[in-house]
Amino acid sequence: LTNICSPLLRGIATMLMLLAIALPARAQDQPAIAITDFTLGNGLRVILLPSKRAPLISHSVWYRVGATDEFAGKTGLAHFLEHLMFKGTKKFPRTKFDSLMKANGAYSNAFTTNDYTVYLQRIASDQLALVMELEADRMKNLVLTEADVLPERDVVRQERLQRIENDPTGPFWEKVSAAIYGSHPYGRPTIGLMADVEKLTMDDALNFYRLYYQPQNAVVVIAGDVDVAVAKGLAEKFYGQIANDASSRPRAELPPLDVKPVDKRLELSDSRVQSPYVVATYLVPSVIDPATEEATALSFFAEIFASGIDSKLGQDVILNQKLAADAGYIFNNDTRGPGSMSIYVVPNPGRSLKEVETAFRAALARQLQDGVTQQDLDRTRKRAYGNLVYDYDSADGIMRKAGQRAMLDGAVAKAFDTRDWERVTVDTVNAAARKYLAADRGTLAFLARNAADLDGAAKQ
Amino acid sequence: MTRMFIACLLLILASAQCLAFEVESFTTPKGIHVWHVADNTIPLVSMDFAFASGTLTDAQGKEGTTYLLSQLLDEGAGSMSGEAFRELRDDNAVRLRFNAAADYFTGSLQTPTANSAVAFNLLRIALTDPQIAPDALERVRQQAIVSAQGRSNSPYEVAIFAAGIIAMPGHPYLRFSQGDETSLQAITRDDVLAVRDRIITRKDVKVTVVGDIARADVEAAVDRIFGSLPETGEPVGVESPATISTPATKVLAWDMPQTFLLFGSNAVPDNSPDYRNEQVLLQIVGGENGRLTQELREKRGLTYGVSLGRYAFRKAFFSLGAMGVENARAGEALSVLRDVLRKVAENGVTQDEVDQAKLYLKGSFAFNFETSGATSGTLLTYMTYGLPPDHHKKRNVEVDAARLEDINSVAKRLLDPQKLIVVAIGKPVGIEAK
């Protein structure tokens, strides 16, 4: 499995969840998250987030390697290796791994992003030793044969066909990413280009594995019904014994962007499009950007301006002008490098993409000019606090939040810290929005059922 | 009793998971049936409820009426406009959703404990006094048309409808539950109000409440929310369709590189003594890393994912599976699929597979109760199936009772490739319509 590009997300609940993920959490009024954080002698970091919700744990291993660590001609390698990590070891061949997971009713999966690769299990809390032993073993002892690798490469080809080629939104979002990021690694598809995927080899995978799958490059995150003392002992026993290979190396820094955020337009029409829409995408600071308050400020702006029917944009294009069926935003700034933010509008039947674009641009220009108000900000902040309680209902969600931050800059506590929320003011929200969402910084993309619907929409 | 106790003990030893929570089942003073689980680990209350009929109540040519109702209940109620309603909902971090399924109209409410009075009041006025304002109806209608147009381009939606036409021709379950463009255009405000009067009633409503709330508060809240609804309302009667007895293959030519293959056949009724046998069987054949995955994905790299599971209505029961395969290998994939099913039907599965599937089904059961919302939703399903309030404690014992010979006899009946319906969308090579 892999995180490729966001599907069109809908519904305020989803938006609020996005906000909760994009923003950290406040300790007072909320059940506290106690974070136990330690590093073993070999450099492997362990983060424990105990909560007594159910007799289950979410155990995960996060590697500091992703699609951005690939090189020319080998796109898709990080994701391909993720698939191959399920092929087994000498001690736990594939069938043994599977039967141990099944025998415990466990959920086991993995995913690859631009910035990291994750393996996770949800299992009864008394089986922590088992999942640790399995993950520690495959961190070092993966065994691959051509008989495993070739069918799996076909599986990945089928995955790409299913997710990208067979669904017009796939190529559409690949074009958007390429336009935003240019030749920066974020401009390439996480799953890889088909021409590259078809040629990946077992040696490619094993070399990549030896470089990056090392204890000093991994973080283990466990949330749920976990006993801190027991987990510490088990981590030392299973993960603490693994030595780093001399050949391993830390990942390279991301290159700087070589494109300027300028006004771009692109379009795609395909008769199989399910829902036509216009989407404007902007480069924005990552949540780990030193100017982190800008990222937080933009999160509040997006929520005020573009979170469904009752946001400023929704009120305008859905309720008043009756032009659109839906409007929302997608943040993709929980990233090591530059983030992005997209605002989309779905036209009503019979309304053109061009009409919707004009209305969107006017609404955004007006919002930037008028600015958000203190009342807007107070209300949005209050809602964000109110919704935090839902995060604490799920150990899996807590695990993901901590692991993601560990991968980005290691500052795990910040993932649960809402002090930034308090520092944000009307002025910082408006300044950040004016800086990053200016009309000459957006890439406008038009997804249509047929070329006639575009009617020159993507031409200026 | 003793046997049950030992089984339970063995189960606990085997899976190391004991779902210790208690469900309290009671009827409120106003006659509403409730299941309640008190749990104050998290300051959250989760409520799920089901009215006894759903989109089957839509009139012919007005399909989508119940769906529009489900989208209109947060569009203004009592003296509150839609905006005011949603503002209060969102300011209080209340999550409220309605869903129109074929047999049931359901809803789900989640609220921080501190805001539960506001949340319950919002739900009460949404159910008892929705405005169904004409401008909101028009807006929701347009949104529903956008969705309907999207579904007509969705391989899954189109395939499942095509399979339905073959499996249960003319049956009410085939009607588009969210409507199509024509039916949505035909719906009037009076139609929506009439559906509301038929569905949103006190008769046979079922409610589950989980979380940080005491029984007395549950009783008071449930009676305030549901107690003043009209008593009337009859579930729409629907007959079970005939079981599938002849195979069929339908090909829909779409210009895309990968073929979407949907396949299905009969399944046993919900109340069948073979229900658990079938569950174990489908886990072995179509579950994670099951036989289909082994043969189609692991050995041959034919697909990214394949599964086979149960797809059931109140009165119609199917098994349903799907996979994506590149066009050139679609015929090969279909013949491997048929071969897997034929072998299981003819030769059965093994005791080892049965043991492993049971362990998985038992061990993973706890995930249904991982969060408050998951718990109230799962319990509502049990309630609508007419299961007892301690079902969560007995379910794994039932799974353990499934026997190899019974499972194999179910396999013979249900996995017969001669009863398989296949719909292929794409440009499949090697698949011919039959």
Image (tube, coloured by chain):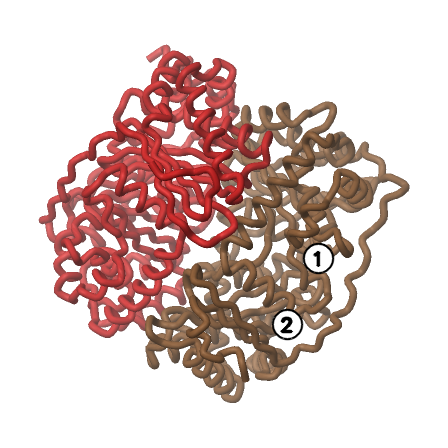
Chain colours: A brown, B red
Residue at point 19%, 48% (across, down): B56
Q: Residue at the spot x=60%, y=43% of the render? A: A223
Question: Residue A132's x, y, as percent?
Answer: 68, 33
Please name which of the two marks, 1 or 2, marks the residue nearer to the observer: 2
Q: Position of residue B249 (x, y in %)?
A: 35, 37
Q: Where does residue A420 sit, x and y in percent of width and height?
A: 62, 68
Q: Residues within 10 Å of mark 2 (few under 14, many from 20)?
A: many
Residue type, label 2 = Val
Q: Amino acid at mark 1?
A: Leu
Residue found at the very far bottom of the displayed protein? A369
Left or right of residue A231, residue A384 in this image: left
Please state if A370 lies on the left or on the right of B174 as rendered. right
Dividing the picture into quarters, in which one does residue A280 lie? bottom right
Quarter the N terminus of chain A occupies: top right
The quarter holding residue B401 reads top left
Do badges 1 and 2 share one subunit? yes
The residue to which callout 1 is attached is: A408
Of pointers 1 and 2, the one earlier in the residue sequence: 2
Residue A287, picture quadrant: bottom right
Any part of residue B159 in sight: yes
On the picture, is B405 further left or further right than B227? right
- Crowding near the residue tagged with mark 1, few <14, some 14–19, many ≥20 C-alpha atoms within 10 Å: some
| Frontmost residue, B132 versus B65 | B65
Chain on which label 2 sits: A
The answer to whether residue A58 is above or below residue A436 is above
Residues at marks 1 and 2 touching, judged by CB atoms closer than 8 Å: no
* Label 1 – label 2 distance at C-alpha: 16 Å
- In this view, B85 is above or below B243: below
Q: State the image coordinates of residue A142 (x, y, percent, origin top left).
A: 74, 32
- In the image shown, does A173 or A102 lie closer to the viewer? A173
- Residue in the picture at 75% in, 54% down: A73
Q: Which residue is mark 2?
A: A284
